[in-house]
Structures are given as structure tokens and as C-alpha cells.
Image (cartoon, helix red, strand yellow):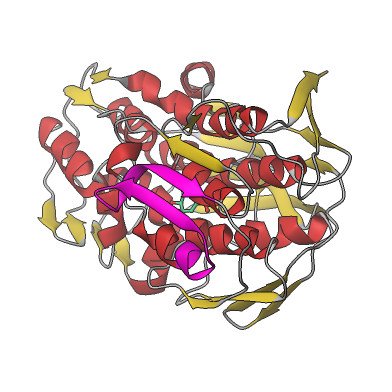
Amino acid sequence: MSGAVELPGDKSISHRYGMLAAIAEGTTKIVNYSTGADCQSTLACLRSLGAEMETRDGVLCVQGRGLDGLRAPQAMLAAGNSGSTIRMLSGILAAQPFVSCIGGDESLSRRPMQRIMEPLRQMGASIEARDNKFPPLTIRGSKLRAIDYTLPVASAQVKSCVLLAGLYAEGRTTVHEPVRTRDHTELALREFGAAVDVEGRAITVTGRPHLVARELRVPGDLSSAAFFLVAALIVRESALTIYNVGLNPTRTALLDFLAEMGAQIKILDVRGAGGEVLGDLLVRKSPIRGGVMEKDRTAALIDEIPALAVLGAASEEGLVVRDAAELRVKETDRIATIAENFHRMGLAIEVRQDGFEVPGKQRFHAGELDSFGDHRIAMAFSIAALIADGPSTIEGAEAARVSFPEFFDTLHRIAE
Ligand code: S3P
């Protein structure tokens, strides 16, 4: 693996910039908005809510409708595969003077929504869900009350949902998080002009701000970079440069963990943009010791676990993952889909309810693998296939388009 990689815009940041642009005043210009299907689902929903937009010379221009300018959608809002779209947008929908329905694909229709329904109901919204917990959601918006809410699960999506709803409530809405999660919403809110106070793990937004359009650049997605970092670390004689990677400190637990395990990764040319941090990464094949992931660290690495499981099996001592029950409710039950593909490659893995254990120094056998429709499983096992003893096939590999449509083209270009 050698050469240079450019990544799509960060998925988390793209969703937030898109949503805030739609409820700001004026035209927001966004460079490097994610090409992933999930972030396109967010834009499609915003269009159905009346926000007009176009892409000019690769720059997404969104005409904001102002805080109170969205209009009732004609049909069910389609969130596709995107948990971020349905959970965060629901915060905005809960405050509208109209009824909206939002749903998604089969995978999204199995994902838990009580975690957003509970705080939004406390704020005064009425929400119905299938079996009172699954999409599609029917949201009857109303005038919202500011609340003080402690998250029962560490979730940046739920935090963001409540903060976005808090924009519409009179007064101050506070969210307390059990562990610090990604803070892109807080940073983006400030960029658009909202007042956000952070004290320890309590985040407070003041309602009814004047949101103003901005010109913004989305850093490359570190969670997408993870697949190439792992590839370069395990494929012999590799050296890769990955440009313009988002390095927000609430996302870089991956780089710390890799460095602790022995990865040679240099961070070059760190710079700021829109409250976010980005830089270039230089990674080389390195001997990896392996390690244990638990507690807060597991929460911070939750999206990177499929790639790290592959790295663990190729490491010296293996990988132990604990406190990862949330993996069971991602796009797939990722503990099960990782384990199934491990079995198909002849790799040992011991599964627990909230994690797994992977011995090191394993031989990867070629096999017939399956993404099970999950983008990160498709990409993680494409990387595993690179060091197998023959060609592997991956059923449903096109799922990669959910976050990284250019993944296979990029992989092809840098794999010699
Ligand atoms: C995200 C938060 C995380 C993460 C997801 C994106 C976000 O989900 O897994 O890919 O953009 O806020 P949870 O909030 O469910 O932990």
C-alpha cells in the first residue's frame, strides 16, 4: 500500500453543517460535504422541508430558511440507513408547527429510538413510533420547554438531538453526558452563532438564537481513514499519506490507541477550520502489540472497532474489547457480523454479550465474506482480505457507499 489518500468529508460534521445551514439565515457554502449516502439522505430530508440547495464547482450551497422557515413535508422523510439523520433531525422536527413522519431502510427500522423520544417528550413534543421504539417516527411538533437532561447512554446523536431541539425552546437547555462524546454539534452551533456553554460534561445551549449562514470546510473523515491506517499497518512494506484528516480531540482516541500499540503514525501540518482541527497523517507498516479496549475508550472508538478487530487478529498479542454493548445496535449487530466474517476467514474470536476477544498472530484465510449491508463491515473485511492467502469475495460490498463511495477506487489505486 503506497501513495496518497484523500477522504470524503467527515460524516458527523457534514450532517450537522447541513442541518444548521437549513435553519440559519442566508446561504451557507460547504466545501467537501460528505459524498456518503447517509449525508445525502440528510440533504434530501432538508429539501423536503423546504431548504433549497445546489452544488456549484463542488461547493454545496444551502439557502437557509431561518429558525422558523421550514415547511411541512409532502411525504415521509427518508433517512435511508442513517441513524444520525433520524435522531438529530428529530430534534428540529419536534419544534415545528406541523406533523412529520421520518423512516428509513430495514436496518434503520430495527434501531432504538426511545433514547431520543424520552427527552423530546419531556420537552413537550408528541412522538409515535412502531412498537413505541422503532422507526418510522410520527412527530407532532409543538412549542418546546427547555430541559436539563442526563443521557442514560453515551451518544453524540442523542446529545445533538436535544441541543437542536433546545434551539427552539425559551431559555437554556442542558445535556449532561456520562462520558465525553464527539463535540461537533457544539462547535458547529457556535460557528453559526448560537451561544453554547460547556462546563465539564454539561453542555448548555440558549434557545432562540439568531443563526447566520457561514462558509465552511468539512475535514476528511478520520473514521474512514481508519480502514487505510489499518491496511497500511498490516500490509507489508506499506507507507501511506492521508490528507486533510479531521483531528478533533473527541475523535482522535484512535490515533492514541494505535500509537500505544506501536503504530508509526506521524501527524503533519495541523491546522484549524470552523472550530475543527485537521492535519495530514503519514503511516507505515509497523509491528502492532495488541491491547485492551474498555470503558470510556470503547465509547470513543465505537465506529473504529470493525477495523481494529482485523488489526487485532494480525497483532502480536491480540485485542480485547469490553463495554461495547452499543455495537449490538449499530447498522448491524457488529459483534455478530464481525464474528461471522472471522469464522468465514478461519480466524478465532471469542464473543461476549458486550464485546469480544481476538487472539493475535492469526493467519487470514480467503473466504466468501458478507457486509450484511453494513458499510463499516464491508470496508473492514476488504482490508482483512488484503492479507488473506487468496482472493476473497464480499457480498454486498457496495454498502461502503453509505459513508465512502470512493472506497474501492481509492483502495485499488494505492494497493500495488
Ligand atoms: C455519531 C455518533 C455515534 C456514531 C455514529 C455517528 C454522530 O453514534 O457511532 O456513527 O455523528 O453523532 P451514537 O450517538 O449512537 O453513539
Query: Residue 43, percent across and down?
Result: 63, 31
Q: Where is residue 118 in the image (x, y as percent from the top left)?
A: 41, 65
On whether residue 123 falls in the magenta region, the answer is: yes
- Please say if 82 is above or below 361: above
Q: Which of 287 and 155 is in front in this view?
A: 155
Q: Is residue 235 visible?
A: yes
**Rendered residue at 19%/33% (across/down):** 364
Q: Residue at x 29, y 53 (%)?
A: 132
- Rendered image quadrant of residue 383: top left
Image: magenta residue range:
119-140
Query: Across the whole image, how many numbered discs are drawn on residues?
Result: 0
Q: Nearer the viewer, residue 393 or 284?
A: 393
Out of 101 and 358, give the one closest to the viewer. Answer: 101
- Examine the structure image and report whether residue 405 is included in the region drawn in magenta: no
Q: Where is residue 164 in the image (x, y as percent from the top left)?
A: 63, 58
In the rendered image, the vertical position of residue 119 relative to residue 185, given as above or below: below
Residue located farthest toward the bottom when viewing the structure as drawn:
200
Answer left or right for 185 relative to 410. Answer: right
Residue 261 visible, this angle? no
